[in-house]
Amino acid sequence: MPIRLASQFLPSGTPAKLWYILISTALQVTFGCPQKPTPPSLSTRFPMDILAAFAEFESSALAAIAAATDAAGIEKVRIEFLGQKNGRIRDLQKLVGSAAPADKPAVGKRFNEVRTTVSEQLEVRQQQLVAQASKAASDFDVTLPGDRPRLGRLHPITQVIAEFRELMGRFGFTVVDGPEIEDERHNFEALNIPEDHPARDPLDNFYIACASATHGGPVLLRSQTSTVQIRTMEKVAPPVRIVSLGRVYRPDTIDATHSCMFHQMEGLLVDRNVSMAQLKTVLSQFARSFLGPGVEIRFRPSFFPFTEPSVEVDMKWGDSWMEIGGAGMVDPAVFEAVGYDPEIYTGFAFGLGIERFCMKHFAVDDIRRFYENDLRFLSQF
Ligand code: PHE
């Protein structure tokens, strides 16, 4: 003990005052006096919220670094956490600024530690990813054949529709569209098809029972594109020269030449002094433009409620005749239904089955092929 050591070296007659001085000096030498305050623990020195923010920053940055899988990903992490402008490190910097002056050195030190750790880990991961990518690149055998991209193409029916629109456009016909869900006025009544006509039999049409209530009357999938004749004439004054191409629906028994859904091209021309000769000319010019100069058109007498006279249209291509649709001069009753004066205007209308042309053109023998979505079939066109 220093006290004892000190007394050993003192002569035995030393006065009490001197003892006191000696002892207290020894105490000072031994324990240090006046004593410096003990350093406060970290928790009182660092405000808890600053510490917590540092810890949170560090752990989420390290997790994000570990989760990055490529160069772009790791760069995003760098910007989010260490970015000069808006990186989250900026918030930590502000916290350092807000710490009490006495805490600043320690808070600053911890800040530097966190920043260094995150920067280092980021760099390590960056290098790992670069190494991975170059390994992947060097593993790639450039001599292997590539994956040929599978190009889509237009459905044969769509191709034919596009060509029909183009051809009829050259004859001066504008293309218009109509809805596939129709009411009875447009599908039947205005087309002069009376209530008791067999064509209106519910068994021959797709009525949509659940839609009738909200529509305020029966609605059905249109059974013919002649509906668009009415919709057009309701809207525009004559002269009219339109075609409309689209789907129609009939509950037919499906076989090689029948489908419950198929496509029609409707044509309507209304003007003064329109003749059936013009109808035949338009149809034969159209058929020749599509299939070739050898094609012939013939009319056979028929009946449609909305044309008078009415004909079935046949087309001769090669050796055989094939029925392609119906046509005729617009019935005066139809003009009356849409408010055209039948004393002034005449017109012709036709409706052709698009599938018929398509089958002939592409030599397809079964209409069902068009709707089966078999790529082995579709990719041939
Ligand atoms: N709409 C008739 C049908 O679908 C075809 C047609 C159209 C007939 C225009 C005459 C005039 O069978």
Image (cartoon, rainbow, N blue to C red):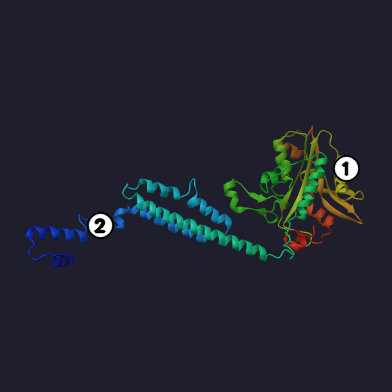
Residue behind label 1 places its C-beta within 8 angstroms of ligand 1: no
Q: Decide which of 68, 181 is in the foreground and name it.
A: 68
The x, y position of residue 101, in whole percent, is: 32, 47
Left or right of residue 167, residue 221 in this image: left
Left or right of residue 1, residue 204 in this image: right
The x, y position of residue 158, in whole percent, is: 75, 52
On screen, residue 352 above or below 230? below
Name which residue type carries label 1.
Thr
First of labels 1, 2 by sequence position: 2
Name which residue type carries label 2.
Thr
Left or right of residue 95, residue 85 in this image: right
Dot 2, how many residues are within 10 Å of its Cα: few (below 14), some (14-19), or many (20+)? few
Q: Residue, x 38% and y 46% (percent of image)?
A: 97
Q: Which circle marks residue 38 in the picture? A: 2
* Residue situated furthest top in the rendering: 344
The residue singled out by tag 1 in the image is 281
Quarter location, residue 148: bottom right
Q: Decide which of 120, 197 is in the foreground and name it.
A: 120
Q: Residue, x 42% and y 48% (percent of image)?
A: 91
The x, y position of residue 129, in whole percent, is: 57, 61
Quarter location, residue 175: top right
On screen, residue 146 above or below 82? below
Labels 1 and 2 touching (C-beta < 8 A): no
